[in-house]
Image (cartoon, rainbow, N blue to C red):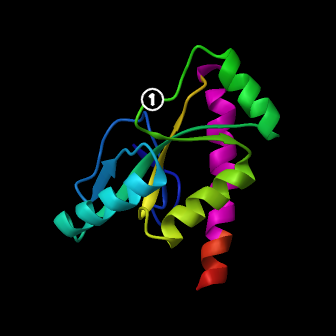
């Protein structure tokens, strides 16, 4: 797991290693995620509790949906899913943290053919936008 944000709000899946101060979990929907988060936070009060999200982002939502449907890679059952734009993903992650669904997220790109471009968009668009939002909220 690689942190792509200096404050550990966003992690990328698929890179080796986990940290004992980070607890990952999956949930089928936001309601389940919020409930699991509360339980895990009580069990691990000093840890950052992060929820897994299978993601695919593209320049527009229609393209993102089309690329997912055309790919062999599919999101995992029982895991939150996001297919859309980088700005939409920024909003989702910010909402997840703001309403105590999780302390952060682990993002897993689901379309292998565009994995590099999705990771690049996460690191160059999503993470900087989340850092700006966090600064404004401080």
Seen in the picture, residue 48 relative to 70 is either above or below; the reply is: below
Count of marks placed on residues: 1
Query: What residue is shown at x 66% (from left), y 37% (from top)?
Result: 118
Residue 6, given in percent of the width and then of the height, sits at 50, 63
Seen in the picture, residue 120 relative to 98 is either above or below; the reply is: above
In front here: 28 or 40? 28
Of the 4 image quadrants, the one containing the C terminus is: bottom right
State yes or no: residue 99 in magenta: no
Seen in the picture, residue 128 relative to 18 is either above or below; the reply is: below
State yes or no: residue 127 in magenta: yes
* Label 1 residue SS: loop
Of the 4 image quadrants, the one containing the N terminus is: top left
Residue 89, given in percent of the width and then of the height, sits at 65, 52
Query: What residue is shown at x 48% (from left), y 61% (from top)?
Result: 9
The residue lying furthest to the bottom in this view is: 138
Query: What residue is shown at x 31% (from left), y 56% (from top)?
Result: 36
Instruction: Name the dominant secondary structure of the magenta segment.
Output: helix
The residue lying furthest to the front in this view is: 31
Question: What span is in magenta?
Answer: 112-131
Q: Is residue 36 left or right of residue 11?
A: left
């Amino acid at each position: 797991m690689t942190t792509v944000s200096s404050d550990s709000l966003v992690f990328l899946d698929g890179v080796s290693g986990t940290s004992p101060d980070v607890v990952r979990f999956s949930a089928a929907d936001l309601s389940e995620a919020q409930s699991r988060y509360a339980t895990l936070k009580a069990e691990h009060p000093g840890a950052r509790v992060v929820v897994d999200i299978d993601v695919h982002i593209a320049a527009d939502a229609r393209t993102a949906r089309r690329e997912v449907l055309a790919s062999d890679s599919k999101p995992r059952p029982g895991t939150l899913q996001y297919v859309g734009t980088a700005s939409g993903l920024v909003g989702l992650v910010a909402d997840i943290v703001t309403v105590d669904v999780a302390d952060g997220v682990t993002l897993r790109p689901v379309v292998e053919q565009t994995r590099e471009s999705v990771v690049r968009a996460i690191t160059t668009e999503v993470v900087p936008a989340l850092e700006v939002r966090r600064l404004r909220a401080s």
